[in-house]
Image (spheres, rainbow, N blue to C red):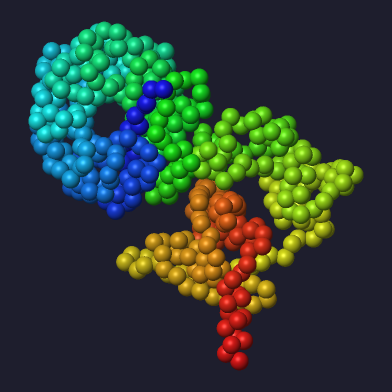
């Protein structure tokens, strides 16, 4: 039986400290419920003393969540601990997370104190928190740069005072994996009562090594990892939950496991990205748009023959519907044949060679090749689009709720709908959904500045899901609402066999009225 590694998710505390990524209480409760479904063991719900909003969020999350431990952060200050304990009164299982700096930098320059006095404060805070809850976690802030002998002394003291988990943060992301792993091993070998507590890793990504350091910590004896969805967090971010979960799931040689339900990872990534208005970089491991995309001809040929040639995990393992064979000038004949057959073309060897030569000429002119380009390549003309944008109008402002009216051309007829939303883009997309009358699930909407300046054009990339398949669309316009509408309709036009049920219902209604 492998050792369990406990997943401590701090998306709602450390992750929410990112400027511009704040959530309200309702949103935090929604995130917490999804983290519970994902299988996290501990949710750090907030820093209650910091604001009334954080206090309320910890209270409401405690009421809403059943299985995970709900954790509240404090400083080594009695008032902080009092407020944290009050916020956790509805938690089925509550934890107070208290601590103080452990490095020379913090002891001398932040607290202007001495090592002995810092340990006294650490013991006092732990004992005080223990009066309220049995489950007390102590963090030795900046442990990554702390002297190991002093750190061992501090850890032993707080475990003796009642700490059940001891957090060893690499607060500044300074450590190398061997340094951090050695630090954890030193504690395991030199703290006499270390078997009475769980060691936890909380690593930051300032030098891009948060995940590597955390894995090194686990290998050397840590059994809790402190992570965030998409790796969000202070400065360069925290250890990424999805990376840790899939490393331990993929490396069967490592004797560790988590309870994370990996098929729910991608959904949670998209949810956090949208809620916190923080796009996931395209090449982000596990959840980035290109994580399972292949554009090199050699890679495409290998993947089409056997996925495991270039993929160490299946996209479905993390909730991504499928991998993507992206057509570019570097793609080979195997990828072109794959896409032509997907579109319904049967191509002989001679026809494929002829099409490939034309494809390369086209690919040299365009960065990306879409289905419409392939249709034109094979038929000599552009396909007729199911949906044509005829009119878009939005009204928004403060305190006016955004309202959008959209008119689409479908089969020679025009259909118009209006909708409200939490912004002009959201309202416009809702109006389009009303016209189409089918369930189109928006996965990602990414806005990219092209040139800069007040006359800049915005490029919008969207991904939509229909019948368990993903489709991508692009739009470009000076008006970001129009760019978003163009991208959304572009993606929807790629959905083959869309029933256009609304048009059929309208036609049926007209016949009945006659």
Residue 506 horizontal side relative to residue 232, left or right = right
Q: Quadrant of residue 236?
A: top left
Vertical side of 395 occupied by 467: above or below: above
On-image quarter of the N terminus: top left
Vertical side of 5 occupied by 396: above or below: below
Residue 477 in sight: no
- Outermost residue, bottom direction? 514
Residue 379 horizontal side relative to residue 24, left or right = right
Q: Quadrant of residue 121?
A: top left
- Please state the horizontal and vertical placement of residue 488, each as a whole percent of the image: 56, 59
- Name the residue: 18% across, 45% down: 90
- Name the residue: 47% across, 20% down: 254
- Name the residue: 59% across, 71% down: 501
- Please state the horizontal and vertical placement of residue 44, each as a whole percent of the image: 28, 37
Q: Which residue is at the front of the view, 307 or 177?
A: 307
- Please state the horizontal and vertical placement of residue 474, each as a whole percent of the image: 60, 53
- Outermost residue, right direction? 350
Residue 265 in sight: yes
Q: How many marks?
A: 0
- Outermost residue, front direction? 1
On-image quarter of the C terminus: bottom right
- Name the residue: 70% across, 48% down: 369
Q: Which residue is at the front of the view, 273 or 218?
A: 218
Residue 173 horizontal side relative to residue 363, left or right = left
- Please state the horizontal and vertical placement of residue 143, each as a whole percent of the image: 28, 19
Q: Quadrant of residue 131?
A: top left
């Amino acid at each position: 039986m492998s050792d369990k590694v406990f997943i401590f998710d701090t998306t709602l505390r450390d992750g929410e400290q990112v400027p511009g990524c704040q959530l309200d209480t309702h949103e935090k409760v929604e995130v917490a419920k999804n983290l519970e479904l994902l299988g996290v063991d501990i949710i750090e719900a907030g820093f209650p003393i910091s604001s009334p909003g954080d206090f309320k969020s910890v209270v409401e999350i405690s009421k809403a969540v059943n299985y995970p431990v709900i954790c509240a952060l404090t400083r080594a200050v009695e008032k902080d601990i009092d407020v944290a304990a009050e916020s956790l009164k509805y938690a089925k299982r509550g934890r107070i997370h208290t601590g103080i700096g452990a490095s020379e930098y913090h002891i001398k320059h932040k607290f202007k104190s001495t090592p002995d006095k810092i340990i006294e404060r650490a013991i006092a805070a732990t004992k005080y928190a223990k009066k309220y809850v049995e489950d007390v976690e102590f963090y030795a802030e900046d442990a990554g740069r702390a002297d190991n002998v002093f750190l061992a002394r501090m850890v032993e003291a707080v475990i003796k005072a009642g700490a059940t988990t001891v957090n060893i943060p690499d607060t500044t992301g300074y450590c190398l994996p061997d340094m951090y792993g050695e630090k954890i091993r030193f504690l395991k070998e030199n703290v006499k009562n270390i078997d009475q507590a769980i060691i936890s890793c909380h690593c930051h990504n300032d030098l891009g090594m948060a995940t590597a350091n955390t894995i090194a910590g686990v290998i050397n004896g840590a059994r809790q990892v402190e992570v965030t969805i998409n790796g969000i967090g202070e400065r360069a971010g925290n250890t990424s939950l999805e990376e840790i979960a899939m490393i331990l799931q993929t490396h069967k040689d490592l004797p560790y496991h988590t309870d994370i339900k990996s098929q729910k990872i991608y959904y949670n990534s998209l949810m956090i990205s949208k809620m916190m208005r923080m796009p996931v970089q395209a090449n982000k491991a596990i959840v980035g748009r290109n994580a399972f995309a292949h554009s090199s001809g050699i890679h495409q040929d290998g993947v089409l023959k056997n996925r495991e040639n270039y993929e160490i995990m299946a996209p479905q393992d993390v909730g991504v519907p499928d991998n993507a064979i992206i057509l570019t000038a570097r793609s080979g004949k195997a990828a072109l044949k794959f896409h032509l057959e997907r579109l319904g073309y049967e191509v002989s060897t001679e026809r494929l060679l002829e099409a490939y030569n034309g494809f390369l000429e086209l690919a040299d002119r365009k960065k990306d090749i879409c289905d419409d380009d392939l249709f034109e390549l094979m038929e000599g003309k552009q396909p007729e689009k199911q949906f044509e944008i005829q009119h878009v109008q939005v009204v928004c402002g403060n305190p006016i709720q955004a309202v959008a009216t959209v008119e689409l051309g479908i089969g020679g007829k025009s259909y118009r709908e209006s909708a409200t939303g939490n912004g002009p883009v959201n309202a416009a997309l809702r109006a389009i959904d009303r016209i189409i009358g089918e369930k189109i699930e928006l996965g990602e909407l990414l806005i990219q500045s092209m040139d800069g300046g007040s006359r800049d054009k915005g490029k919008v990339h969207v991904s939509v899901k229909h019948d368990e398949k993903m489709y991508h669309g692009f739009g470009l316009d000076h008006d970001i609402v129009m760019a978003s509408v163009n991208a959304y309709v572009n993606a929807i036009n790629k959905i083959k066999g869309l029933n256009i049920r609304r048009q059929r219902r309208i036609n049926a209604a007209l016949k009945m009225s006659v």
